[in-house]
Amino acid sequence: MPRMRVAQLTLGMTLRKQLFLLRDKRVTTTRAGSLLLHVTLADRSGAVAGVYFDVPAHVPDSLVTAKGVEVAGRVAEFRGQMQINIDRIVPARLPDPEDFLPTATRPLEEMIGEFEALLASIQDPHLSGLLSSVFDDAQTHKAFCRAPAAKRYHHACVGGLLEHSLAVARLALAACEVYPQLNSDLVLTLAILHDLGKIHTYDPISFDRTDQGSLWAHVYLSASLAERRMEELPDFPAELRLRVVHAILAHHGRLENGSPVLPMTLEAIVLADADKLDADARGAIDHLARAHGDSSSFTEHSFMHETRLYRGAMESPGAAQGEERP
Amino acid sequence: MPRMRVAQLTLGMTLRKQLFLLRDKRVTTTRAGSLLLHVTLADRSGAVAGVYFDVPAHVPDSLVTAKGVEVAGRVAEFRGQMQINIDRIVPARLPDPEDFLPTATRPLEEMIGEFEALLASIQDPHLSGLLSSVFDDAQTHKAFCRAPAAKRYHHACVGGLLEHSLAVARLALAACEVYPQLNSDLVLTLAILHDLGKIHTYDPISFDRTDQGSLWAHVYLSASLAERRMEELPDFPAELRLRVVHAILAHHGRLENGSPVLPMTLEAIVLADADKLDADARGAIDHLARAHGDSSSFTEHSFMHETRLYRGAMESPGAAQGEERP
Amino acid sequence: MPRMRVAQLTLGMTLRKQLFLLRDKRVTTTRAGSLLLHVTLADRSGAVAGVYFDVPAHVPDSLVTAKGVEVAGRVAEFRGQMQINIDRIVPARLPDPEDFLPTATRPLEEMIGEFEALLASIQDPHLSGLLSSVFDDAQTHKAFCRAPAAKRYHHACVGGLLEHSLAVARLALAACEVYPQLNSDLVLTLAILHDLGKIHTYDPISFDRTDQGSLWAHVYLSASLAERRMEELPDFPAELRLRVVHAILAHHGRLENGSPVLPMTLEAIVLADADKLDADARGAIDHLARAHGDSSSFTEHSFMHETRLYRGAMESPGAAQGEERP
Amino acid sequence: MPRMRVAQLTLGMTLRKQLFLLRDKRVTTTRAGSLLLHVTLADRSGAVAGVYFDVPAHVPDSLVTAKGVEVAGRVAEFRGQMQINIDRIVPARLPDPEDFLPTATRPLEEMIGEFEALLASIQDPHLSGLLSSVFDDAQTHKAFCRAPAAKRYHHACVGGLLEHSLAVARLALAACEVYPQLNSDLVLTLAILHDLGKIHTYDPISFDRTDQGSLWAHVYLSASLAERRMEELPDFPAELRLRVVHAILAHHGRLENGSPVLPMTLEAIVLADADKLDADARGAIDHLARAHGDSSSFTEHSFMHETRLYRGAMESPGAAQGEERP
Amino acid sequence: MPRMRVAQLTLGMTLRKQLFLLRDKRVTTTRAGSLLLHVTLADRSGAVAGVYFDVPAHVPDSLVTAKGVEVAGRVAEFRGQMQINIDRIVPARLPDPEDFLPTATRPLEEMIGEFEALLASIQDPHLSGLLSSVFDDAQTHKAFCRAPAAKRYHHACVGGLLEHSLAVARLALAACEVYPQLNSDLVLTLAILHDLGKIHTYDPISFDRTDQGSLWAHVYLSASLAERRMEELPDFPAELRLRVVHAILAHHGRLENGSPVLPMTLEAIVLADADKLDADARGAIDHLARAHGDSSSFTEHSFMHETRLYRGAMESPGAAQGEERP
Amino acid sequence: MPRMRVAQLTLGMTLRKQLFLLRDKRVTTTRAGSLLLHVTLADRSGAVAGVYFDVPAHVPDSLVTAKGVEVAGRVAEFRGQMQINIDRIVPARLPDPEDFLPTATRPLEEMIGEFEALLASIQDPHLSGLLSSVFDDAQTHKAFCRAPAAKRYHHACVGGLLEHSLAVARLALAACEVYPQLNSDLVLTLAILHDLGKIHTYDPISFDRTDQGSLWAHVYLSASLAERRMEELPDFPAELRLRVVHAILAHHGRLENGSPVLPMTLEAIVLADADKLDADARGAIDHLARAHGDSSSFTEHSFMHETRLYRGAMESPGAAQGEERP
């Protein structure tokens, strides 16, 4: 059997010697006393949970996260999510490690191109200077382009943060056309920088939250990073600095969502709403995509949306119906 | 003195025989027993409150709302809002009534053009048919193009509903480019129809809420109107009907905001967030514009945004101030 | 063994060839990969969950919901709820299908009699006409008298909606005696119509929510149905129409409970509170009745009441104690 | 001019030597430095606010609350509420003090008769004994029959507490017919006792909250009073005592409304919902009755209902409309 | 194997004939039909859960709570909590029952000494008299010194209530130094009495909530007990009585936390905040202490704190990690 | 008349040529069109509002905030707060400006002494180094010792921030004795630094919020300042830095209070609760102190405590009153 990508796995499939990246591992004990190994197996096309029942005690320690593993088992399902029931898992060398990192839907190169064009489009010399001072640092540039934007699901991929930031920028750009009062250079700068702190919030391989990400939160991290860069720029206007840090702090829109201040400028308001639109929409697209193999016309509960989502009538999946949802 | 438009009034100005449309009137008694007449005076350029202290008892009854009045008085201010202190007010004939109805910022003709183009762009035959069945009725078309979208402020103008609907449509269109999964015909149809019930929610002259608007709410009115039109269309797909009514019902995004259901489809989610973005942004633009003649760098409290808004540094942005912010 | 009714099942009982209606079925996979069939088995006396461990793969597909099944297994318990552990389940013909539909506590005939008397008692010609226009339609009449009022528990039975509507009507009638200001014809009409939309909200056999029930919600459905009937009546007073639709929309009492408007008329207020009283009381009666076989003086948590309910002191269930709770 | 009762006052009326009970008085200073005397003037038919502008400094001290006053002034209006603008106010002897205490709508004698019948109807010897031990005390009986149930509006009258308690009892009785599971003796006892602590919560003349009423709250006071009486009864069953105190503590239905526990028994649940129904309905009846002399179809905002209430269409108060609201 | 204390148990340890106190027991049925016995096993050093799979049907009934048991089994883990998988459990006589009751961290004698000193330090004769009237009753004194302060965790031990009350007293004493306006005798009396009702709220062995504890809540119980004692004292000042009961009622600080009134005196405010500080801090100390054997730098979710707690960096706190956090 | 200090002013007093510091000024227009000048007049002993009715138009501009004024007028009251009704106000030179700045209750020198001792008591070299790096800067030291901690009331004084920080430190120190698990050096450092950002949040003379204070909030400012100082210290442990910034960010205890993260460490929890205790207690002390000249036993509503506060029985605490409270 040739190598199967995660996205190609289907229920009931038997795996012999499949290669995956081991994203994380955890051992639990059942009430009855036997050991379970829980892993996340990943490649470029996605990630899937795996469980090894009655795992021999030496196995978990033999595995190293962020390295390759070879797995035998069967593709099953648990609570509506796909899961590999593992029979055997051993360390393995990955021929092309790049091929095992999950990536965003959009090609990374394309997104980086759009990102560079966006940076180049900023005409305000101060904001342009700020962005340069952040992204001229090759390490930050790379981290920003590769960081995930969340621990789970779609944005839990290489390029997730970039994809989200670009989506917010596009929506903000549309808003600029509707509301000429918006300072477009400012709102685009904010679209790029508002989640910058996420480069320190998630582990680049396991996508787990870092301690700093949990204890400081990315809202603070992003604001603090931006504030420091602006301080280092000789003539950065105090007024503009006030507005940049404010909008980053306020971008979650409500105190109970973790913003220490409410949006008080037009740019901060548009940033917060565009950020919410992208999160809600992308989250819905992913949640709908994960629903499968079930005859219900609704998905499981989506915690982000606080409700189940509607997948469409299931009974007669005929042509006419298909047309309605292009 | 030539006729002054509302937008031209400035603090301290004395008015002799100014013509306005009387939008509404209300009489109160002061604690000390004298009568006060409160009016809203309007023309194409905007609206302004007026107060007549110790008004002679016969005056209020002599005035008819939605008709012209001639006013003498002085432009003053009360709690940060402009107000005309009236010395005399009598009925008057308006030479060109159209000139006394406040209108949206954008020219009505331009908006109607954009609206027609939008209607024409819908390719799904069922949705296109639905829109035709609604707007081919000349009365509905006119009501929709002229209705206000709110009782107060910006959207309290002829064309306010249309301007808001077009803004939501533009934002939704941008979202369609970011998320190809969106059914663009559906989301644009929803942008147009989601507030349709507002044509029955506000009085077309006083912009007061109608009894029906208060007791049924525009969310219900819009959904019910759309449902009935779809029922009358012979082959309208049941599935699509489900989605249209659902998204209209859900467009306030949260139960506590008056939507009886949460958004459960991608189109309903994008509609709700785009509606919120336009309301927040437009509300901020207007709130900032109303602040004037005051040296504070913040506006009064904005109830919509639950905070004051930032107008920018006001005083001499000199060195001393800069020192405070390291 | 003669046929056992659901209400007669007791823990530990062994079933050989018991007949039930199959209300619904669902297949899941355990973490360890085996198949589980979950079913709801019902007859006139109630419904009970069933589970078939390691069900052969062909069994689930052989079963048809809303048809009869013959079951062998044992009556067990899971998390405080009775459950049949199934050893065998096959399709079967039900000799008297009527006997397998769970029904309300009160005899259906008795309730229909009370309902007819209630309809006949309405003297306002417009409201009487409205009710006729709704219930003269035999299909609606039948659907209303047979629909459940909820997916689970007591009201999940044939006649559940009718029983609830009659209870609300009785409470409203008592309120009319206390508050002569109430329009009694109106409040009784509302008691009957406020949940009318539930005839489209639940599947008549599985009692599952329909797509329309989830996406539109019964508050909207009821209001929209009533509005349309009133529109078709030639002389129905506009004022009365306003009040009927308003009260139906407002009957959940609070925006966060899914009413798009708050109750603003006396009748709407009494309707909402009487509806809440019946839901709370009936829900408590059922929750207490389901608690069994456990020595705790409290039930499990009741999500409707947001607390556990008190069953009474358990230790010495003597005579004195019994007297206290007649 | 003969003596006018409060209920007979109409806007614009001039008063010469009218007698009232002085319910309370308060002196404030205007921003401009003059003194204002605020009083509440009352008689059997109701209460009305009065204001004395630039009151001579010796006047306030000459007046004694809970005694008679003679007033000259004019009936005006302030913020939609009637108000007497006072020109002169002096102490006066009331010929028949009883005639100056506002009373409930229902005749006190009739209510006391209903109350006695209710007490006599309780058959459970323990509950009957509890009620006797409370109300055989003549002072408590009198206090209970005369206490107000609130500081303002309808229930701010002699007999207000009794009227409310009887209304709750009637609603509970109706519930007993709908739900035979209810212990009717218990729920009626609770209807009578749940607000007993209000006899210590409001001043019997000014209807102001007492310190104890503010610091302990009537929920606690009622429960504590009932607990003590039960303790003194030799054989009162412990289980029943648990239930009585619990239901009194829980009768506000939600923690945020001041109940330290949620209702956990059927009787507690029905008590809480019936209490809410009477408060909501009575509050609406009073709020609607207070609205007057205004052409709006809605009342002012009702804080209890968190919304304005609908008074009915105002434009054409013709026959047809009258028919709709008998 | 000598007797192991609960605190000495480690994962994987095998137990042969270990003695424990049986705190409580509960039988459930698995979905597959077998019986599970759940017990809480305790000694002076702590408590641990135990599970007996497929327990023979006669075993549960042979065991008596609050008596000794002899257990064989293995120390395992379930969901991050230690658990004994039981192979055999039989009744047994405890040689020294005192040695099997879990106790507070601080020695009981030391705490009682501090408690006596605290009582002696109260100089206000009325408050001192109140405390005497409560604690001169030997049974109350003993119950207070031995009662737990919660069902679970740290305060679920003999002396838990005393330890909590002393901690609150110490914090209140510190507050007295910072705010000389505080009545120190009053606030210390409140620290001692505010949770007095907990002696009736928890079973002294199983630490389960009593029916009274659930139905009346300790806030009410404490206030009612204190009110009655003060009533019995001949000259207790009415004003002081008002303040004592008020502060006890208000000590949960917010209505939604079960206080029927908000704190309105300085002493009530300080009591509520000191109570919260001790609960939060002690809860965090215990939650952190229970986390073990896991490489995560965060604990499981703490429901009291509504978040996970930070345990500190776990992995090699080396250079690489430092690099991630600039 | 000699100079009267603010604290010596009493109702009705007439002022001739009193010197004050002008803290702020604001001009409004009455509805009737006349100008009002609102000022805050202050000296070392406190601050008082002043109003100048029909102020001549040139007066407001002649006055300079943070400079001296000479005032004539009368001491009146408005809504329960003292207010000077101004007849004349002119610029004036203050002989000893220091004497016109309101100061904390505790002598500044005493507090600075305590502060220095506190700094010296920190033994952890890193935390000690951090504090040195902050406070060795003379400007920061001075700003910290003189900044107010709030815009209004007690903490609106020179030394208010210092007084609050010391109070939190004392409470934290008491907590260290109760919970030996606390890192006392860390919690004391946090007590000192948690509100450091307030030196940039309030204007040092007018005590108005700065733009930065409103847009960034002091929670962010304090965390960002501390983070930067730690970064500059060569060997500051990463783990300790994580904890310091975390606790500062979390010190408002709840997201809805403006903390972007919840407290997750013991020190952060104790800091948040001690901060709340000082705010609540100090706020109550001040609110009670401001109530005066009124016979009510309760204060006006305190927004901080969401209730009125109890001042104690006011009237003749004689027998009659006792009777009301059994």
Image (cartoon, coloured by chain):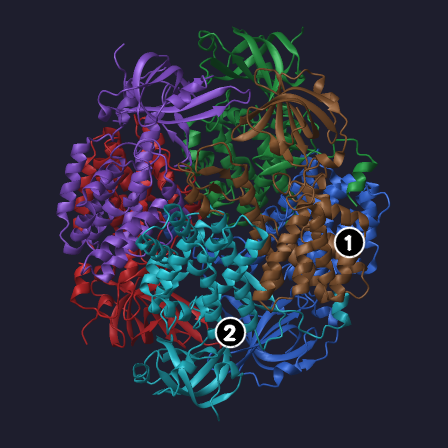
Chain colours: A brown, B cyan, C purple, D red, E green, F blue
Between residues C90 and D89, which one lies in front from this camera angle?
C90
Name the spot of residue C142 as percent of width and height, x first: 21, 38
Q: Is there one chain holding both mark 1 and mark 2?
A: no
Indicate the position of residue E315 as horizontal and vertical percent values.
Answer: 76, 31
Q: Quadrant of the N terminus of chain E?
A: top right
Q: Quadrant of residue F37?
A: bottom right
SS at circle 1: helix
Q: Is residue F74 left or right of residue E174?
A: left
From what the image shows, is residue B112 above or below residue A257?
Answer: below
- Residue E87: image quadrant is top right
Q: Please state which amino acid type lies under the numbered disc 2.
A: Thr
Which image quarter: residue F240? top right
Q: Which residue is mark 1?
A: A135
Q: Residue at x 24, y 40 (%)?
A: C144
On residue C150, the disc is none
Seen as rendered, the residue at the extreme right is F234
Percent position (x, y) of residue F100? 70, 70
Q: Nearer the viewer, residue F116 or D233?
A: F116
Amino acid on which disc 1 is placed: Phe
Q: Secondary structure at mark 2?
A: loop
Q: Nearer the viewer, residue F237 or B166?
A: B166
Q: Residue at x 19, y 52 (%)?
A: C130
In whole angstroms, how far apart are the C-alphas of marks 1 and 2? 40 Å
Question: Taking the image as drawn, is residue F191 in sight?
Answer: no
**In this view of the protein, can residue C13 be seen by the observer?**
yes
Task: Identify the residue under disc 2.
Answer: B105
Look at 47% across and 42% down and name the residue there. A307
Q: Chain of mark 2?
A: B
| Dot 1 and dot 2 residues touching (CB under 8 Å) | no
Q: Residue furthest front?
A: A319
Residue toward you, F302 or B248: B248
Work out whether A266 lies above or below D35.
Answer: above
